[in-house]
Image (cartoon, helix red, strand yellow):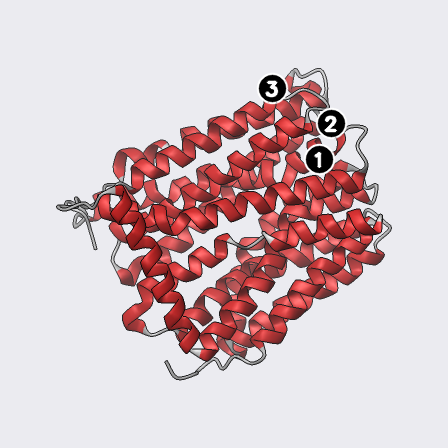
Amino acid sequence: MKHAGATKQGYETKTVISWAFYDWANSAYATTVMAGFFPVFFKQYWSAGTDVHVSTFNLGTANSLASVIVALLAPVLGSIADQWGNKKRFLLFFAVMGMVMTGSLGFVAKGEWLVAIFLYAFANIGFTGGNVFYDSLMVCIVEKKKMDFVSALGYSLGYLGGGILFAINVVMALKPHLFGFPSAVEAIRISFFSVAVWWALFSVPIFLFVREPKVRTAQSVTDAARSGMKQLFSTFREIRKLKHIFLFLVGYWCYIDGVDTTVIMAVDYGLSLGFDQTVLIKALLITQFIGFPAAILFGKIGEKLGTRIGIFIGITVYVAVAIWGYYMNDPAEFYVLAIAVGLVQGGVQSLSRSLYGKMIPSENAGEFFGFYNMLGKFAAVLGPFLMGITSLLTGNARCSIFAIIFLFVTGAFMLAFVKENSPR
């Protein structure tokens, strides 16, 4: 599907690049805030004086609650946007929410962990909620045969843009005086502002140059919301009849939860072990820049050995990383683990999507992928909570790693019963 005027190659290229740059824009939040500085600042500054196990529990709970809220809202909001043709309006709403909440983190005073967790939760909702409508806009700008390339372009710009700003922010935190800041604390505060500005600045193209097809008839909000829920339950009933697709989705939810939990809780875990924040932040940078080319390599592994085997390889590496993480004592080991995670992170995600695409009935691909994407929003709901509660109950941060191992092993067990070429 193309909007009017997209038949001209130059205009189409501008539209596609404008769409992809939103990934460049908001990926700065995922790197600098979600995976990088927020866990550090939350534990060492906003939760100063709080037991490390309590702060881990608080952070894990906030991540889980935000993911649940977005997952529950996504199908309803998506249906409303489809009926009204207002994807960009909803995208703007969630993006501005994320920007404002992220920038506001720079004003939170030391010890105000509750305020910080509130702003962070709503920033997460803005980030993930906006992605629901960002992803759905792709069908408005490009034909199906070009979607693989366009989707990959968005991911690649996201890795690059998020990595560039994160690298700048890391230098600011490590060498604050070079930028005129009195301390690393002030540099990190400014980093939150920089993410909000970066997000806003590079979001401009998608709102200026990406158009939506006009919808002639629109349902009321109530009817659209009801349609979204009806389709959600209808798709779920259909999936339950297809054994191997159902098994795959259960397994996928488990192991992808482990993948996302590793991303958002790794720094918190390292801090709980007493590692210096500089080591942890540098490790995140390593993972960021290794991730994209490694995803391409895993695509080749899937072609040669089979998609499911490729996913098993990635899960095996994750389990090995988790076990090593339990015994880890030397901060330098964190770098090695960061490289290992970077090698398999993008591969597990991309191969999972392609395996699912091979299994689902092609005539219902839209609704099945809609369910798949909604399930992905629930990722990182159970993992952070299990890590937090395990650490709190045992009084040992290392024991929280068993929560991740449990998710990966359960996911692999379910995947073992999935036939890659099962009847549709």
What percent of the width, then of the height, locates residue 394? 83, 52
Q: Residue at x 43, y 57 (%)?
A: 373
Q: What's the CA distance linking mark 1 and mark 2?
A: 8 Å
What percent of the width, then of the height, locates residue 214? 16, 44
- The residue that mark 2 highlights is 45
What percent of the width, then of the height, locates residue 215? 17, 46
Q: Is label 3 in a helix, a strand or a loop?
A: helix
Q: Residues within 10 Å of mark 1 (few under 14, many from 20)?
A: many
Instruction: Specify the quadrant that holds the N terminus.
Output: bottom left
Q: State left or right for residue 315 relative to residue 83.
A: right
Does 1 appear above or below 299? Answer: above
Q: Quadrant of residue 24 in the image?
A: top left
- The residue that mark 3 highlights is 107
Q: State left or right for residue 43 relative to residue 378.
A: right
Please, which residue is most extreme toward the right here? 329
The reply to whether dot 1 and dot 2 touch (C-beta < 8 Å) is yes
Please, which residue is most extreme toward the left here? 216
Q: What's the CA distance linking mark 2 and mark 3?
A: 13 Å
Q: What's the CA distance linking mark 3 and mark 1?
A: 16 Å
Q: Residue flagged by tag 2: what amino acid is it?
A: Tyr
The reply to whether dot 2 and dot 3 touch (C-beta < 8 Å) is no
Q: Quadrant of residue 220 in the image?
A: top left
274 and 347: which one is in front? 274
Q: Residue flagged by tag 1: what amino acid is it?
A: Val
- The residue that mark 1 highlights is 40
122 and 32: which one is in front? 122
217 and 214: which one is in front? 217
What percent of the width, then of the height, locates residue 292? 53, 54
Instruction: Specify the quadrant that holds the C terminus.
Output: bottom left
